[in-house]
Image (spheres, rainbow, N blue to C red):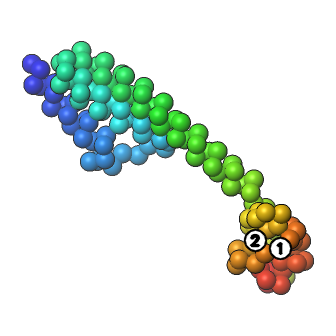
């Protein structure tokens, strides 16, 4: 009976490690899926069907926690990037708007083409370079 449980658990473990394409939106979801598959496989090998269930639960929970921390770290990096930049909208002669992202560098800003400004440039200062 145990042999019949090992095969599905092993397939789940292989599938969750990337053998198959699985669409998860977050690292937490991916971690839970991978952890459940690996936990079920290891649990099945160690303790049969009960081991597979316990392994899947523990692996899924652990995988979610690790993946969720990765999601939080990614959010912090994205927030820091937005805090380190400024957007300036340039109103073009044809009615369109060009948005220029400037990265903070020391006390000034660097434009997309590498030019340095010792202050946050105005729309009028950026129009000759990025507007039309």
Image check: 93 left or right of 1? right
Image check: 48 left or right of 114?
left
Residue under the image location 19 percent in, 21 percent down: 46
Q: Quadrant of the N terminus?
A: top left
Q: At numbered mark 1, what does the secondary structure look like: helix, strand or loop?
A: strand
| Residue in the foreground of this view, choosing between 113 and 13 | 113
The residue identified by callout 2 is: 110
Q: Would you identify the image quadrant in which residue 16 lies?
A: top left
Image quadrant for the C terminus? bottom right
The residue carrying mark 1 is 117
Left or right: where does residue 106 sit relative to residue 12? right
Q: Secondary structure at mark 2?
A: strand
Q: Is residue 21 left or right of residue 118?
A: left
Residue 110 percent coordinates (x, y): 75, 71
Question: Does the rendering let one see residue 14?
Answer: yes
Crowding around mark 1 (Cα neighbors within 10 Å: few <14, some 14 to 19, many 20+) is some
Q: Residue at x 19, y 31 (%)?
A: 8
Spot occupied by residue 90 in the image (x, y as percentages of width and height): 83, 73
Whole-number angstrom distance, CA of label 2 to CA of label 1: 6 Å
Residue 35 occupies which quadrant of the picture?
top left
- In the picture as drawn, the residue positioned furthest to the top comes out as 50
Observer-nearest of 17 and 105: 105
Rendered image quadrant of residue 4:
top left
Residue that appears at 76% across and 78% down: 115
Please say if the residues under marks 2 and 1 sit with CB atoms less than 8 Å apart: yes
């Amino acid at each position: 009976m145990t042999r019949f449980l090992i095969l599905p658990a092993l397939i789940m473990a292989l599938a969750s490690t990337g053998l198959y394409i699985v669409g998860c939106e977050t690292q937490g979801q991916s971690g839970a899926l991978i952890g459940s598959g690996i936990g079920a496989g290891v649990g099945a090998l160690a303790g049969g069907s009960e081991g597979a269930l316990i392994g899947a639960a523990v692996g899924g929970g652990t995988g979610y926690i690790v993946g969720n921390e990765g999601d939080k770290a990614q959010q912090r990096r994205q927030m820091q990037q937005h805090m380190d930049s400024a957007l300036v909208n340039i109103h073009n002669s044809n009615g369109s708007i060009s948005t220029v992202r400037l990265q903070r560098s020391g006390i000034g800003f660097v434009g997309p083409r590498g030019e340095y400004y010792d202050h946050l440039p105005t729309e009028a200062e950026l129009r000759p370079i990025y507007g039309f």
